[in-house]
Amino acid sequence: MSADTDLISRAAGGDPSAFQALVERHRSMVYRVAYQFAGNHHDAEDIAQDVFIKVYRSLDRFRQDAQLTSWMYRIVMNACIDHRRRQRPALAAPFGDEAEHRMLNTPEDTPGPEERAYAGELGQVLEGEIGRLPSGQRVVFLMRHHRGMKLCEIADALGLAEGTVKRQLHAAVHRLRQALTQANVTAGERA
Amino acid sequence: MTTPCEVHASGAIELYFYDELTPREREAVESHVLSCGHCRTVLAELGVIRDALAQRPVVSGPASGDWSRFMAQLDASIAGERLPARNIVEFARASRRTYVSYVAMAALLTLVTLSVAIAIRSRAVPAPAVTGNVAARAAREPTDTAAFTALSEEHFERSKLVVLGLATKDPQRGAADWRYERELATSLLNDTRMYRLAAEDRGLTSLAGVMRDLELVLLQTSLTDDKDPASLPQLQRLIQKRDLLEKMDVVTTTTGL
C-alpha cells in the first residue's frame, strides 16, 4: 500500500491528521495547476480550496487501484472549469466575450517578482491570449503543455472523445499563433 | 484567418510537434514541411510558444509563501462536512459503547435476579439502540428515495430542453442556433453530477447510469467549441449513440413518478 493510499484510507476512516498530511503532500501541485489556469493568486486559492473539499467528500469513492495524481488532477481540472462558470453571471454570453476578457485580464494588486520578470512582450501576449481561450481549449492546452499529457490521456481524464481534444488543442494553438502574429511578436524578435 | 495548407488544417503539424504521430506519419509530415513554407513557419511559432511557456513562472503556493491561512480556511470549510465512512466508524463506535453498557446492565440484572429467584430465567438482553436506528432509517428511506426520484425527474425535464434541443437542431444553421442549449448545459452540469453521485449512493443504478450519460453529453456540450461546424453533428451522434432521450423517458416512467 502506497503512502497516499494509506493516507486516503485513514482519512476516509475519519483521521483528520491523515487528511491534513494528504493535503500537505499535494497542495503545491494543485496550486500550481490552479494558478496556471487562473493566472492570479486569489482565484488559484479558491480553486485549490474547492479541490480539497471535493477530495474530502470523495475519499470513500477513491478506488485503491487508481492513480491518486490522475484522480486528483481530474478534480483540479473540473474545479478550474467550475470556478470559471461560477465567475460568469448566470447564462451570460459564452466564453470569449468582452466582459470575460476584462475579468480575466484584470491585473493583480501586487504582482510577485516572478510575474514581473515574465511580463515581457511575448509573455504578455501569450498570457493575455491564454486568459481569453475558451475554458475547454484552455484546459486541454494546459494539460498538454504543463503536464505533457498525451491526447489520449487528456481525452480519458476529461471523458471526451480524442477527436474533440485534438480539435480543442488545434483551436487553442491557432489562437495563440494568431495573437503572436497580430502583436507582431515573432521568433526573430523574441531574442 | 484562412489556412493555406491542408496538412496544417488537418492538425497534423501540431500532432507532429507534440510527437503524437506514428513513425510513418512523422516521415510524411517531415517530407511535407521541406516543401511548405507555411508549415515551417507554424512549426517555428509553436517552438516560440513552447519556449515562452517554459519561462512562465511556476507558482506553487500562496503569494506570502505561508500556507497557514489556506489550511485554516480548509479546516473551517470541512469542519461541517460529514463523511459517510466517518459516520459509519462513529456509528460503529457509538453502537459498541451502547452494546457494552447494555451488556453490563444485563449482567447486573442477571445477578440480582439470580439472587432473588434462581428459577426465573433471565431473558435475552434487550436489543441495542442500533435496531431502532436501522428501523428509523429503513422507515425514512422510501420517502427519501421517492423525493429524490421526483427531484431527478424535474432535473430530467430541465435537461431535456438541452438534449431534445440539440438532437433536433439543423447543423447547417450555424453556431448561434444552439448557443442557448450550450449555455443551459453549462448551468446544469454541476447538478447532474450531484444527482448522479446521490443516485449511486442510494444504489439506484439505472438512474445513476442515465445521469452519467447525461453528464457526459452536458460536459461535451459545454466544452465543445460552438464555432466548429463538426461539433453539433458530433453531439447529436453522441445523444443517439447513448439513446439518451429514450433512457430519460424510460427511467422517469419506471420509477413510477
Image (tube, coloured by chain):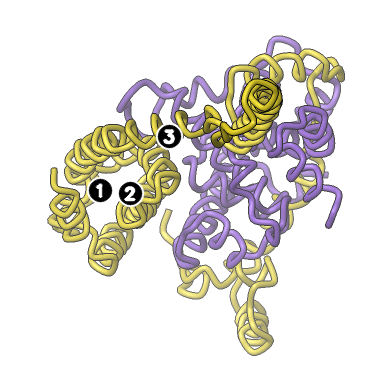
Chain colours: A purple, B yellow
Label of residue B175 in the image: 1
Cα separation, mark 3 vs mark 1, equals 14 Å
Q: Residues within 10 Å of mark 2 (few under 14, many from 20)?
A: some
User: For the residue marked with disc 1, what is the amino acid?
Assistant: Ala
Q: Residue at x 36, y 56 (%)?
A: B205
Q: Same chain, marks 3 and 2?
A: no
Does B111 sit left or right of A84 as displayed? right
Apparent side of residue A129 relative to residue B245 in the rendered image (left or right) = right
SS at mark 3 in the image = loop
Can residue A38 be seen at all in this image of the molecule? no
Query: Residue A9, image x and y in percent?
Result: 74, 45
Name which residue type carries label 3: Gly
Disc 2: which chain? B
Q: Nearer the viewer, residue B131 or B124?
A: B124
Q: Amino acid at mark 2?
A: Asp
Q: Nearer the viewer, residue A41 or B106?
A: B106
